[in-house]
Image (cartoon, grey):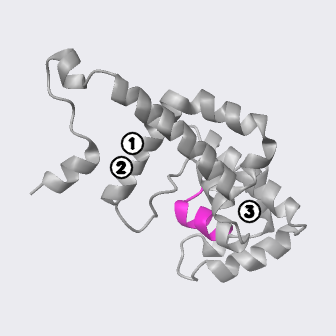
Amino acid sequence: MATDGTPEFAAKRCGEAIARLRTLRGWSRAQLIIRLYNELPPEDPNYDSISETWLARLENGRMVKVQRQTVEALCRALRCSSQERAWVLLYADRNVLVDAESAPTPAAEALTFVMDRLYAEAGDLLTAMVSQQPGIAQDELSLLEATAAALEYVIEHHRRAPAPEAASGYAAATPMYALRRTRT
């Protein structure tokens, strides 16, 4: 959150994503609010502040910050598919691999690292594959296959590259998921 009270860019993107999904479903703000109340427990700190005005502020980018629990509840209220949920969480600057109530698992840490490498090393390739066939973005299996092909490209690139310790003379850095297992 900006110290001057201006909205975070992530909150603006999140609001736009929520508005787009609500509009695609043909729901009014009032309909989404009713569904949202069914997804939020009454003891949630945001429960009393949720209203059509609140949703309008979110959708129009005038919300300073949106809590993770509220974003998740909005996804449930919108009956988001797993792909739509991942998209909303990405736009809200939230990691799809963790939730608000628990620490990241070793698998989540490993996947975060792999996603970072995949995006850094094959993001352009994956973008080209998805752009060439716009239907891929809607078809879950095709998207998984395109991502697998990009991951295979990265793996092959790493097989051909010299090991980091051989190139630098130092041992490779220990990944976070390995550090977690070695802590006492």
Q: Nearer the viewer, mark 2 or mark 3?
A: 2
In the image, is residue 123 above or below residue 82? Answer: above
Q: Position of residue 134 (x, y in %)?
A: 80, 42
| Number of marks present in the image shown | 3
Residue to which mark 2 is pinned:
110
Q: Kindly identify the amino acid type of the residue bearing the numbered disc 1.
A: Phe
Q: Are marks 2 and 3 in contact (CB under 8 Å)?
A: no
Residue to which mark 1 is pinned:
113
In the structure shown, which secondary structural element does the residue marked by tag 1 occupy?
A: helix
Is any part of residue 80 visible from this angle? Answer: yes
Q: CA distance from mark 1 to mark 2?
A: 5 Å
Q: Earlier in the sequence, mark 1 or mark 3?
A: 3
Classify residue 94 as left or right of residue 181. Answer: right
Q: Kindly identify the amino acid type of the residue bearing the numbered disc 3.
A: Trp
Q: Residue at x 78, y 40 (%)?
A: 133
Classify residue 74 as left or right of residue 107. Answer: right
Q: Kindly identify the amino acid type of the residue bearing the numbered disc 2.
A: Ala
Bin the neighbour count of mark 3 within 10 Å (Cα to Cα): few under 14, some 14-19, many 20 and up: some
Classify residue 92 as left or right of residue 173. Answer: right
Q: Which mark is residue 54?
A: 3
Q: Position of residue 170 (x, y in %)?
A: 14, 22
In the structure shown, which secondary structural element does the residue marked by tag 2 occupy?
A: helix
Q: Which mark is residue 15?
A: none
Q: Which residues are magenta?
A: 65-74
Q: Residue at x 83, y 75 (%)?
A: 31
- Residue 66 belongs to the span the image colors magenta: yes
Is any part of residue 6 visible from this angle? Answer: no
Quadrant position of the N terminus in the picture: top right
In the image, is residue 59 above or below residue 154? Answer: below
Q: Position of residue 115 (x, y in %)?
A: 47, 42
In the image, is residue 75 above or below residue 63? Answer: below
